[in-house]
Image: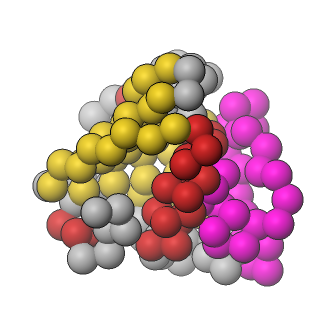
Amino acid sequence: MTPFRCDYNLDEAGRIGAAIGRALAAGDVVLLSGDLGAGKTTLARAMLKARGLAGEAPSPTFAIVQPYAPPEVDLPIAHVDLYRIESADELIELGLDDYLYDGALLIEWPERLGGEAWPEALALSISGSGDARVLTATVPPAWETRWPLR
């Protein structure tokens, strides 16, 4: 897996998220890690917008899974927030793998997955505060030829 790191500010978050969103394909899992307020939802919203979502995507914190499907977007995507998940047993009820047959998953708080992660997932970690952010990506082989940030 190839590591990638870039510094960015909040004005650039939309551009970065959109670039990643345009590269999404069916079967993809994007794991978004970072502290509260780091910008995970901001990047996910930009990915959804790049796939055609016209309105503001709500945070899935309370719904846990917020699905989007055509014609709202051009690729079915489930935006998932695992912050309120307390044990890996609760994940079975979510049926997340079902979304990967013809769509993609954007998962915030992936550390709640325990050891149950997808080996080919694109792992994005956001750190920083204020306007300064750092994106660290672990780019799996499935993403290397289409990774949009160089």
> Who is closer to the viewer here, 10 or 84?
10
Q: Main secondary structure of the magenta part?
A: loop
Q: How many marks?
A: 0
Q: Residue at x 52, y 38 (%)?
A: 9
- Location of residue 117 by image quarter: top left
Q: Residue at x 24, y 76 (%)?
A: 145
Does 140 sit above or below residue 138? below
The percent coordinates of residue 119 (x first, y second) are 24, 53
- The colour scheme used here is secondary structure
Does 136 sit above or below residue 72? above
Does 16 sit above or below residue 103? above
The percent coordinates of residue 81 (x first, y second) are 60, 37
Left or right position of 56 against 1: right
| View extreme (left): residue | 1
Quadrant that contains the N terminus: bottom left
Q: Is residue 53 magenta?
A: yes
Left or right position of 142 against 43: left
Left or right position of 38 against 49: left
> Who is closer to the viewer here, 119 or 91?
119
Does 130 sit above or below residue 133? above
Residue 110 visible? The answer is: no
The percent coordinates of residue 107 (x first, y second) are 51, 45
Quadrant that contains the C terminus: bottom left
Residue 72 visible? The answer is: yes
Q: Residue at x 79, y 80 (%)?
A: 71
Q: Which segment is the magenta one?
A: 45-72
| View extreme (right): residue | 55
Q: Is residue 82 magenta?
A: no
